[in-house]
Amino acid sequence: MLELGPDNLIDYLRDTGRLSAAVAARSSAEVLSGGVSNVVMRVTVPGGEDFVVKQSRAQLRTQAAWFSQPERIWRERDVLEVLSRVTPLGLVPKLLFEDRDNFLFAMEAISSEHLVWKSSLLNGEADASIGRRLGETLAMIHARTTGDSDLRERLGDRTIFDELRLDPFYGFVAERQPELRAALQRLIDETLATTSCLVLGDFSPKNILLVPSESSSDGERPRLVLVDFETGHFGDPAFDLGFYLSHLLLKTIKHARRSDEFLEVVRAFWSAYRGACSMPSGEHHTVSHLAACMLARVDGKSTVDYLTSEAQAFVREVTRNWLLSPPAKVDAAFSDLQRRLNAVCSC
């Protein structure tokens, strides 16, 4: 495999006929920030359409050793193709071309003026309307793919999901925290036994782009764009819910003094999702995923970098209780977190 970077990508695109010599001479490439598993580069074409090239790597960029098969790029390509069929135009980027020998594909570039929702949240911007729209979006994806036998066949293998989610999140923590091992193993087993719908596996604020601006009946609002689908598979929708909610609750903890505002975003998402999509399993299963994902982001292989040591200890205490005795309802978990935050923050 030819490993590509900003120093040789334009040459590669010219040599493979994706750019003419004249266009290549005035084009440039830059690495985009983001996750730990791929190299993602934006190609700027003056006077033309910019695009993004994504290439997988076998070793992920984390402190703990973490490997995954480069073939996962084709799972992302397949999920992107499915989403382009079952969601409204513009929610996901258009595919442009692929190179099987070099484990890469290209897709349209999103406006460089976009914001990554994660950055907005970390900066303290709590917009419940975005939470509501995302609840509707995830419910649509889950509902429109539920029971699809073709997708179950095409996307049923969960090797990549295990390599990038179950093992480094749940398995890694279970090995190091014996008191939670049984609960986490049970959660892994239940997850692998569930095959309900398309599950994105990485539905999180870092993969949600806000593109200004879109006219609507209630004024201007950003267009939502979803990216990063290599962990997509046909499986347990509760994982998507727990994974996404874990990110929002961790940011709620970061902004503990404004927990009411951030929990409004969380509740808006959950209300919109539950209003549009039924749960195939009890809500306690979603709470277990929520707790396990939160704990993994402080003690797993890929940890967040915005929580203080005191906040990390708080996460461990809360999630341990939820894993050993999950609240029966997701709303009850939100209320429990709010009560605990109020107890430690007297503001």
Image: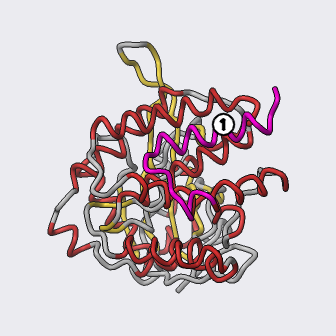
Image spot of residue 306 (x, y percent): 77, 50
Label 1 crowding class (10 Å Cα cut-off): few <14, some 14-19, many 20+? few
Q: Which residues are magenta?
A: 321-347
Most extreme residue toward the left, as rendered? 149
Most extreme residue toward the right, as rendered? 309
Q: Does 31 appear above or below 219?
A: below
Instruction: Say whether residue 306 is left or right of residue 34.
Output: right
Q: Is residue 126 visible?
A: yes
Quadrant for residue 78, please give it.
bottom left
Q: Does 312 appear above or below 230?
A: above
Q: Residue at x 62, y 44 (%)?
A: 118
Q: Residue at x 43, y 55 (%)?
A: 284
Which is the main secondary structure of the residues drawn in magenta?
helix
- Pointer 1 residue: 339
Quadrant for residue 251, please give it.
top right
Image spot of residue 256 (x, y percent): 74, 36
